[in-house]
Amino acid sequence: MEEVEDRVVPSWHAMTPEACIEELKVVENIRRTGLTSAQAAARLEEYGPNQLSEKRKVTLLEKIWHQVNNVLVAILVFVAAISLVRAITDDPVTNGIQVGIIAGVIIINTCIGIIQEGSAEKAAEALKAMLSSDAIVVRDGTEVKVPAQEIVPGDVVMLGLGDKIPADLRMIECGNLACAEAALTGESVPIDKMVAAIEVEGDPSRTPLGDRQNMCFCATLVAQGTGAGLVVSTGDFTEIGTINALVNKVEDKKTAVLEQIDTVSKWLAAFIVLTAIVTFSYDFWGVDPENSKWLDSLSIALVCAVAMIPEGLEAIVTVTYAWAVSNMAKKNAIIRALPAVETLGSVTVICSDKTGTLTQNVMSLTAFVTSNARYKFDVNSKERTNKNFVRDDSYMAERADHLKLINANGVVKGGASASRRGPRSKKKKKTLENDDFPFTMNSDVIDTTVPSLEIDDDEPSAPVKKIQDNTPVGSGESPELPFFRQALSGGVLCSKCTLGKDGTRDGEIGNPTELSILRAVYFTGVNPTTMKDDVPVIAEVPFSSDYKFMATIHDSREENDGMGMSDKNIVHVKGAPDRMIPMCCNQAKAGLIGETEPLNKDYWISQIAILSSHGLRVLALLRGSVDAGTVQKGEQLGPEFVQEKGAWLTMVGLCAIMDPPRPECVAAVRESNMAGVRVCMITGDHKDTALAIGAMLGLVDTEHTEAITGPDLDALSDDEMKKAAMKYNVFARASPQNKIRIVKALQAQGEIAGMTGDGVNDAPALKASDMGVGMGKEGTDVAREASDMILADDNFATIVVAIKEGRTVWDNLRKVLMINTPINNAQGLSVLFALIFGMEQTPLTAIQVLYCNLICAVTMGFVAAVEPAEDGIMEKPPRRVGKRLIGRFLFLRIALGTAILVFVTVFSSFWALTTFRGEELCDTAEWNALDPAEQKEMLWQLVHSQASNSLTFSALSITLSARFAYNSAMHTRTLYGNKFAWYSVLIVTVLQIAITYIPGMNTVIFAMGPMKWEQWIVVIIGMVVVFLVMELEKALRRYLSSIGSDTDDLEFDRFDSVPNFNSDDRLLPKGASRMVVTELKK
């Protein structure tokens, strides 16, 4: 990817439209004239096309080199070269087969490695796919459609409903414009747009993207209204371009297992070379110096080398990952990069996005409050019944815990969107202004010119007490359908929204907040579409962010409005509660239409305060009436139709709306904490909303009581940032750069940080985290392609399953090493010690060794790779960073396994050599017909058979014992749990019998002869000895563990790589809007 030059980026949102026009050096009447074609061409030359830069792709040759560039492959290549020389000069059959096997091993492992890398470079492509293909701009005084790539700074872009915004725009004209920016900013509802400059204190560049309400951002969508915007940034300089640069700049880092495998390989390589040198030296100078040939001695040394190289280790590691991937896919966790499975097992912190990840990403009516009761709505119900509403006067009846000590006036002024309000007007008298009360249908842009309800300073801090009654139903009961049809009719009729198919989001049109009421009515049993068709709108007062309400006039219907209203038109009003209360004189008694009582102003203020403290959006439903015929059909009405009548409306109730938590996430968070994994929520939403959701999920507790916002994080130094990352579980108003900085701060504190997310704004942090988790259903392609794992069901609880699988992978990889390493070591050391103890030839041939390596990896190694999790794995803490794959006790186990296998193999070989030397190994006539060389060859064939079978079958004992790290394998549990263990025993037995007894294969290829029955007795004895020794070792470890020894290798020791988390590396630069892109390591 080409480096993006640094530019000084003005804070467009803090500038007036006139200042932006001057900064861009365009004419004052740019809205009417636009750029000329010549100016557009010149600017295209200056700024470049409006497209994202691409990262340089890795070539196939580079991928191949990455796979073969290690010392073990180098040793194999050297062995293959020597075997090729011997094939040409000495034995073409045996050495030719050996060369072919080695080449095949290298090719297979290389192919597996390349395939497992997958499609890691697709994130940038997914970002490009989000960009608009064309746009309408003003050029030469005319509106024309041009390719999005040709848009330049200074262009005027015209926006309409459904348009995808082609570049970052500073709005110069808005007509009830709102944009859906959830993918970029994390906002769960569309954001109203404005033209005026945003007044901010301090550095304007730290204003979160979601608060820049006079800006529209590239790749977001127009949800309602129209507008015109001045292009201020294109291509890599847009906000999505910054994300693209962050995604492309993140460098992949090997996971702990791959680093440990590299370390193990280096130590093995050193040990292999040392053993080979000792073997060569001993054979060349120590056995028969006068008759030794260097090529023969070198060949024997290389047999040791080939024997000890774990050719199948890399393949079996991949198989271990692949098996875990397959298991996880069945449980809706899709892994994009195989090593990510292991990383899950060591995750200590999960940083989760809120919208769509911990929550349902569906604005839902959660409660309906009347003058005497509150009704809780089951947002998760799929049945259409009035039972979904249940009277529960205790539901959210008190202020949220974190705000209990704040008086109602303060809560109302703070609210779920308080961080978005503009500068307050300096008035001596406190008023419940909309700049202080931020709950609206679309956004929180407040018009401070409209007077509203006054509040006295002595407003009570406790909810207003009210007399309990059972009208219309008692606690725990559900009113009949007519109650909700009438009470919520204003939310249905006073709406232009269209509900999706069967109440879902499929095909829905309109504002999510308004749709929540229609959805609740639908699942109560009323069809909103039919209801609207029966009573069409006569006239309306359209919604505007200036006065924050909408009103519609309808003919009366008895089922909606009660009796005695036939000569009236019904006026339904829906809007921000603080704007509505001054217009009310009455309230619907118990929510019943037709029964009114004087308005209890203090009660409604208290209820607003309570609901807002829980982070809920609140809409008031009101109704009034005018004489039939007063308003003509289609008449254009203004806000004065409602405002100039004074206090004349009836308050029906309050609709409390939120994006609710996923029900399964509460349990998932609890399970994560039990497993030693902390869960943090990072969201672009407001602080109090985030705290409310966090409290419901169990993220807010006595240790993590507060939340911190993105602008607050921007002001922190690196050291303060590290402390904040550990102190808070809830991060609100977070920008993409904030998210990465949080992740890097956690990593700097020694945490293994996972990050979940579904939006474009999550992509950089997903790549920078140790474990990026994207959403498969609701997530964007950008987030999915930047992830290591995708949740197919968007279920946070699936992460817990994945964490368990990740821990199992680490355990199983240790078991793989416990099986493969002793077997490999025993093959080479058996050759060396056999020579040292006086054996004139090697007990194992090179082809036997290669075969044994592969068969052990494919069968016995696979047994460990697919072993299910042992009991209690989720009760242990996550694996510590820097812990070796081979700890002290595993190293001792490997050493013990190696020693006992070498002993059994060498002992049985000497036994066969001494037992059958001098005996007739076939019929007397046939034996006498053989010359001494042929008789000697037949003897050594039996020795090779004895060594091969003793080693391989004893390796089965190692395998069966290693299935359980601590529990005894001398138990019925060995018989079940892993059917592949017994498949392995069967396959190995069949293959060993085949290479031992099939004529031609045994003698020509493997240099083995058919074994005698007494040899099999020795093999069985060896198997029993090995099994008992390994089980005795486990019994000793269990005893040591019972008296407090660290037999789990959990604690650091002198050989572990204790990470230095207090390095001088700076975290990402501060600032929520723009940053100098730096290299990031994953």
Image (spheres, rainbow, N blue to C red):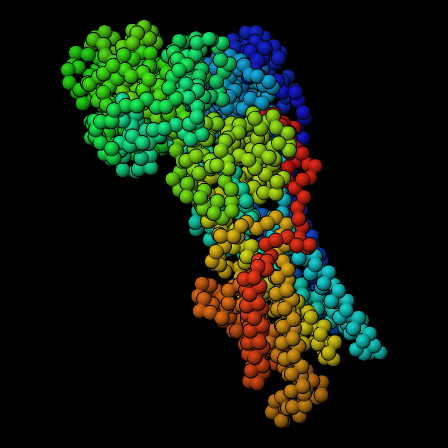
Residue 663, given in percent of the width and then of the height, sits at 38, 39
Q: Nearer the viewer, residue 105 or 357?
A: 357
Q: Which quarter of the picture shows residue 294?
A: bottom right
Q: Quadrant of the N terminus?
A: top right
Q: Against 688, is 346 above or below?
A: below
Number of marks in the rendered image: 0
Task: Identify which residue is drawn at 29% across, 13% down.
Answer: 584
Task: Identify which residue is drawn at 22% across, 31% down.
Answer: 474
Q: Residue farthest to the bottom?
A: 925
Residue 939, given in percent of the width and then of the height, sits at 66, 84
Q: Against 431, is 235 above or below?
A: below
Q: Nearer the viewer, residue 89 or 900?
A: 900
Residue 842, given in percent of the width and then of the height, sits at 70, 76
Q: Which quarter of the picture shows residue 714?
A: top right
Q: Against 28, is 68 above or below?
A: below
Task: Identify which residue is drawn at 81% across, 78% down.
Answer: 288
Task: Identify which residue is drawn at 49% across, 33% down.
Answer: 705
Q: Quadrant of the C terminus?
A: top right
- Locate residue 469 relative to residue 548 in the image: left or right: left
Q: Can see residue 139? A: no
Q: Can see residue 830? A: yes
Q: Which quarter of the picture shows residue 1048?
A: bottom right
Q: Nearer the viewer, residue 156 or 215?
A: 215
